[in-house]
Image (cartoon, helix red, strand yellow):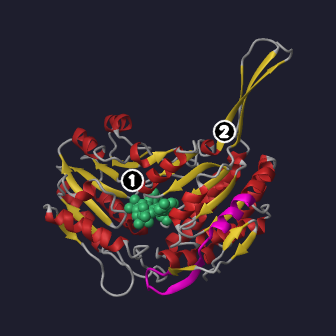
Amino acid sequence: MYPDLKLFIAGEWRDTDSHIPVINPATEEVLGQLPRARLSDLDDALSAAERGLKLWSATSPRDRADIILRAATLMRERQEEIAQSITREHGKPLPQARLEVIRGAEFFEWDAGEAMRTYGRIIPAAQGHKFAVHHQPIGVVAAFSPWNFPMSQPARKIAGALASGCSIILKAAEETPAGAIHIARAFQDAGLPAGVLNLVFGEPSEISAHLIPQDPVRLVAFTGSTAVGRHLTGLASQHMTSVLMELGGHAPVIVCEDTDVDAAAVSGAVRKMRNAGQVCTSPTRFFVHETVFEDFAARFVARAAKTIVGNGLKDGVEMGPLANDRRVPALSELVEDARNKGATVATGGGALSGSGYFFQPTVLLNVPDTARIMQEEPFGPVAVINPVPSLDAAIAAANAVPYGLAGYAFTNRADYIDQMIDEVEVGNLSINTLEASMPETPFGGVKSSGYGREGGSEGLDNYMTVKHVWHSRKIV
Ligand code: NAD
């Protein structure tokens, strides 16, 4: 139920002489030893990706789509095996891991369809002249995916690159390598030519520093923290290399006085704890109209406190551990800081004792603006609930962070919704649902949450360049 851990370069699985242990965060047992790429492995991946690009960019979009769809079908067929390995390495409950596998397959299926719709356009011109706009694959992609969704995060990047006719070198997260390994296996079995998809692991800073300056690398695609995104964008800018950055979020939820308070509170508490809050769109800062604040907070706290926490392989578990040990002190410090500055810790507040990196579902009430958590994304099962006197105040609070990824609201008032569409600074706004995106909708942020979009009909834009061709019938 856990795959052999290898690098995948030029269509072959490869081991090295140096390894990183992969730990089950629920039990702290070692699941396997992940090979650490040497510089020579990275150079091999780069040469393979250059050869892969030549072949794949010349492959018809329909043939590319066929292979991508075949791989997605294999992932669906292998759902249980993949989900079991995701739960072991990441900790999330098995039903959530199963859904993640399907969502990953859906990203491939959507982008496979988009591969055939990367239309250019004809621009009107004088007789004897033709202006035509072509979209072409940008080149070799260097991609970096994080550990919070071991399968669907790599899927986003690989799907975008392959559908656009690019080749890719992906460095997936060292904590959770199995999802990406299963994807590479599915593509190998689906007949993807060697070198189009290469998978490496190792020291993240060494790999990015080596790959990004290389001439064939034309796009750096990254999902992760804003700090690392800024660093990689800096490296890429020195070589005028494009970037696609899906960075942190600190999602606000505006709860208006007209909503069904009970339903909104339960939805918020359940959704906040999904993936142990380790989601860039996780609903975190709840700004609740003061007339319904007490009711909302009481219902939210009661539901959050009932969350069943445990090993994700066990039936009925709703929330697993944090994905790695460094997140436990990071969250404890944020909660302590809020408590010291006057917030009420209404439930939870610290790590659970025993083995595994478990953190209690935590709700903080009346958190002052000076608390670090009002600016820093907790990326864990911690919610903030504060009262606000008006929608204007809620929107001002929602926008008072450097992030702008997802934002949510509960209301049925058309005037409120209209104002939020105009004024809430996010890339994704959801009303009466805490779901932020689907494969067919464009996903990405504004402000420090990044550049570019994944998914939707915009999803391949970053992976392609625009070439304008002016054809004159006669030499002029
Ligand atoms: P981190 O900033 O150390 O790392 C984030 C990711 O970037 C990891 O996958 C890591 O392997 C990678 N990384 C780090 N340095 C790199 C480098 N020089 N080159 C290439 N890749 C590099 O943070 P962390 O402790 O792993 O995670 C905590 C924070 O990361 C969270 O607070 C959250 O903001 C962010 N995060 C965001 C997402 C997301 O979906 N947007 C996912 C995971 C983590």
Q: Secondary structure at mark 1?
A: loop
| Relative height, residue 44 to residue 116 (above, below) | below
Amino acid carrying mark 1 in the image? Gly
Which residue is denoted by mark 1 in the rendering?
249
**Which segment is the magenta one?**
23-48
Which is nearer the eye, 36 or 106?
Answer: 36
| Quadrant housing the N terminus | bottom right
Q: Are marks 1 and 2 in contact (CB under 8 Å)?
A: no
Seen as rendered, the residue at the extreme right is 474
Q: Residue at x 79, y 16 (%)?
A: 129
Q: Secondary structure at mark 2?
A: strand
Which is nearer the eye, 471 or 74?
Answer: 471
The spot of residue 320 in percent (x, y) is 41, 76
Kindly tell me whether residue 140 is visible in this rendering.
yes
| Quadrant housing the C terminus | top right
Report whether the residue tagged 1 is closer than 8 Å to ligand 1.
Answer: yes
Q: Residue at x 14, y 61 (%)?
A: 341
Q: Nearer the viewer, mark 1 or mark 2?
A: 2
Amino acid carrying mark 2 in the image? Thr
Rendered-image quarter of ligand 1 = bottom left
The spot of residue 262 in percent (x, y) is 28, 59
Mark 2 is surrounded, within 10 Å at the Cα level, by few (under 14), some (14 to 19) or many (20 or more) other residues, namely: some
Asked which quadrant contains residue 266, the reply is: bottom left
Answer left or right for 122 relative to 463.
right
Answer left or right for 469 relative to 237.
right
The spot of residue 371 in percent (x, y) is 20, 57
Q: Residue at x 33, y 87 (%)?
A: 354
| Relative height, residue 149 to residue 139 (above, below) | below
The spot of residue 87 in percent (x, y) is 51, 77
Kindly tell me whether residue 65 is visible in this rendering.
no
Residue 465's mark?
A: 2
Instruction: Report if residue 469 lies within the magenta region.
Output: no
